[in-house]
Image (spheres, helix red, strand yellow):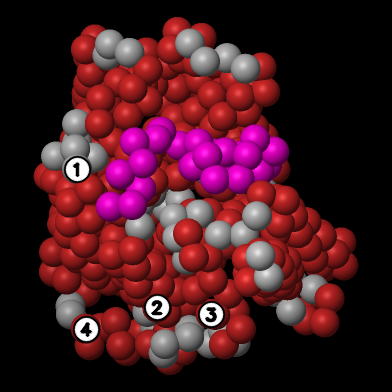
Amino acid sequence: MVTLATSDLIVIGLYFAAVVCIGFLAGRSRRDEADFLLAGRSLTTPVFVMTLVSTWYGGILGVGEFSYQYGISNWIVQGVPYYVFAIIFALLLAKRIRSTNLATIPDKLEQEYGRPTAILGSVLTFLLMTPAPYVLMIGVLLQLVTGWSLSVCVIAGTLATIAYLFWGGFRADVYTDILEFFLMFAGFAVILPFAVAKYGGWDFIAGNVPPQHLTWNGGNSPQFVLVWFFIALWTLVDPSFHQRCYAARTGEVAQKGILYSVIFWIVFDAMTATAGLYARAALPSIPQPVMAYPLLAEAVLPPLAKGMFYVGMLATIMSTLNTLAFVSATTAGRDIVARLRGIVGAKETTGAVRWGLAGMGILSVALALGIPSVIRLWYTIGTVAIPGLLIPLVTSYFDRWKAGSRMALASMASGWIVSTTWLLAGWSRDMGNPAAYPLGIEPMYPGLTASFVVWGTGLAIRNYRRATR
């Protein structure tokens, strides 16, 4: 059981009040569509770093769940591949994205390949940015605080996030992210000294966790670990990365901001991995590993400090939830509905985004309650969307590697359809057991292969036609 003192509840209440107030106050200065969608393309390097760092690390309960189950392999699986692809993104794409002066990924797809590819890309982007895992996590934490049912807490957390985004748009997202950047680090800076004081240092951890928790793979198969590296390709197609680059003041701000962000992620990963190992060592029989951090806090933290730690977890989740909610709404309202209806006016587009917030909220709540596992939600969403988006989107920034419009659409559709079909085939046999997938192969691989083959064929046809002219 989790118990919170009055002082803890006051701290948590003040946090929610501060976030909502900041979100609504930020919206007072919005002026036009560019301001509503991209904060006027005004992000400086410090603001860029704070909003990207906090946004890209929302899965804190999932990190605790993974660390508790698999130990330091959490860092190999959930950390290292994302550092690598973030650096690649910074060096190869950040400046190119900012120089386009576009607003969204589907804008780029339409510019390069036409409307049909942009619309399919919008659907995949919407799926990729569905904030269901974070809606689930915020619901779990609110349930711990309030004692209400999970469904009520999921709905309440979603509504609280949508409210200030509905009014303030991306600027509200940015301003709340700045506050949450400091709070997420403060929360884990609180719990680690208390854990060390109660249990001791590394010797305690090494002597009380299973041996495989201190191995690189955590006892999992190499294929299982490798598929998470492929899921980290998410970084290259992640709309929040693209959105921040579009919103940066310059291309240099975007590039340097991502590189600086990697340093902060490494530090925060060290803190969260250590907390996860303490939870496994001190509490070896937790029935729900997703509760690793809250139960560790229950074991080591006094009142007020516990409230601060909960605020740190809430800030980590909500900073990502609000960004994903806004990008999902932008994709649904502006990139799908407005594009299909031919809406171009700023007022009408903003209205479509607001309707998109409502649709996003309903879908996210349904997914969170239907698949109540953060890791499975990450896995499912990434497996379905990444194979379709990756190759057409990344190559769109390099003229040498672009195929024709029809082949781009075919490549996107084939990657998405093959990976989704493969995933559903495995689920129909044994609810996602990797051994149940056709040929024992994770769905990401055939999806990416199909997309690559179609893309390579299109590229070969294009080069042949150029050579024979």
Q: Is residue 292 visible?
A: no
Three-letter amino acid code at disc 1?
Thr
Neighbour tally class for label 1: few under 14, some 14-19, many 20 plus, Cα within 10 Å: some
Measuring from the top left, give residue 119's x and y in whole percent: 65, 36
Q: Is residue 30 visible?
A: yes
Q: Are marks 3 and 2 in contact (CB under 8 Å)?
A: yes
Earlier residue among tags 1 and 4: 4
Measuring from the top left, give residue 449's x and y in whole percent: 69, 73
Residue, far front:
469
Three-letter amino acid code at disc 3?
Val
Q: Are marks 2 and 1 in contact (CB under 8 Å)?
A: no
- Residue behind mark 2: 76
Q: Secondary structure at mark 2?
A: helix
Instruction: Name the disc covering residue 225, or none.
Output: 3
Q: Quadrant of residue 465?
A: bottom right
Give the left or right position of residue 139, taking residue 221 as reference.
left
- Residue behind mark 1: 250
Between circles 1 and 4, the one closer to the viewer is: 1
Neighbour tally class for label 4: few under 14, some 14-19, many 20 plus, Cα within 10 Å: few
Q: CA distance from mark 3 to mark 4?
A: 25 Å
- Residue behind mark 4: 202
Q: Residue at x 33, y 52 (%)?
A: 96
Q: CA distance from mark 4 to mark 2?
A: 19 Å
Position of residue 421 relative to residue 187, above or below, is below
Give the left or right position of residue 331, taking residue 178 as reference.
right
Three-letter amino acid code at disc 2?
Ile
Neighbour tally class for label 3: few under 14, some 14-19, many 20 plus, Cα within 10 Å: some
